[in-house]
Each structure stands twice: as C-alpha cells, then as structure tokens.
Image (cartoon, rainbow, N blue to C red):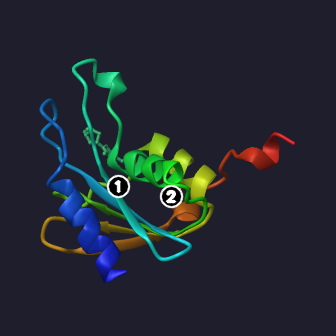
Amino acid sequence: MKELIKHAQEMRTFSHAPYSSYTVGAAVLTEDGSIIGGCNVESSSYSLTCCAERVALFRAISEGHSSFKGLAVATENGGSLCGACRQVVWDLCGDIPIFIADKNGKIDKTTSAELLPEAFDKSKLK
Ligand code: THU
C-alpha cells in the first residue's frame, strides 16, 4: 500500500488545476497487482472537470482492468473523495480500502462502504 500511496502523491504533480489550484492525485491497485494513476483535470467550463479518482479508474478500465483491490488519493490537506467519485468507486470497485494522504504524508484509512453508506447500485436495478 506504501507504493500505491506514493504513486498517488506523484500523480498530484501532474494535476491540471488552473481554476481551483487544488491538486489531487489518485492511484488504483488492480487485481493483477498493477498500479494505475490519475490526476484532476479542470476545464474553464467548470462542470467538465474530472476528478483524479475517476481519471485513474477510467484509465484503468480502458486499459483492460476490471477488478480493483485498493485506491489511494493524495491532496494538500487530506480532503476526502467527492460524492460523484464515491458513487463511481462503489460501482467499479465495490468495497475496497481507500487511503487518503495529505501533503505531509499523514494517511487516513477508510473504505468505499464507509464513504457511501446505503449506496445505490446495480443490485437495485435488477
Ligand atoms: N477533486 C478531485 O480530484 N477529487 C475529489 O474527490 C474532490 C475534488 C478536484 C476537482 C477539482 O479539480 C478540484 O479538486 C477542486 O474541487
């Protein structure tokens, strides 16, 4: 998990955040042990911004990965995942450990189930 967190911290340096200046890095650990990262990418049409967590997950999915074992997120102040990312993480990963690091390396450990209690998901659509 140390490597996963380090990767998320490195991804933060690639953040494109000219509007908020809030840089975020993320990294997902796949079932086969690969680590795939992402950073937040902002748009001048603010709502088109994509969070680091979703960039990492969408990148992993598009590279053929479909099963995930962990997620790390790195921000300046240990900010947690937004609501949209909580839903996407739940949908794509189920209940996995999530590590949130601040710029000093302080780590909060949580899970996707803790972050999204009573989640809506595909089980309600059948
Ligand atoms: N952001 C993320 O990348 N992940 C989150 O879960 C929270 C917010 C980004 C989006 C935007 O670029 C910046 O942080 C400020 O909201």
Q: Secondary structure at mark 2?
A: helix
Residue 49 position within the rendered picture, expressed as x and y whole percent measured from the top left: 32, 31
Question: On the image, which quarter does residue 95 sit in?
Answer: bottom right
In this view, the residue farthest toward the right is 126
Residue 32 position within the rendered picture, expressed as x and y whole percent measured from the top left: 54, 75
Q: In the drawing, does residue 53 fall left or right of residue 103?
A: right
Residue 87 position within the rendered picture, expressed as x and y whole percent measured from the top left: 55, 46
Q: In the drawing, does residue 109 fall left or right of residue 61?
A: left
User: Foreground: 63 or 84?
Assistant: 63
Question: On the image, which quarter does residue 90 sit in?
Answer: bottom right
In this view, the residue farthest toward the bottom is 2
Whether disc 1's CB lies below 8 Å from ligand 1 is answered: yes
Mark sitting on residue 80: 1
Residue 70 position within the rendered picture, expressed as x and y whole percent measured from the top left: 48, 70
User: Foreground: 82 or 61?
Assistant: 61
Q: Residue under circle 2?
A: 115
Q: What residue is shown at x 65% (from left), y 50% (from top)?
A: 119
User: Foreground: 27 or 94?
Assistant: 27
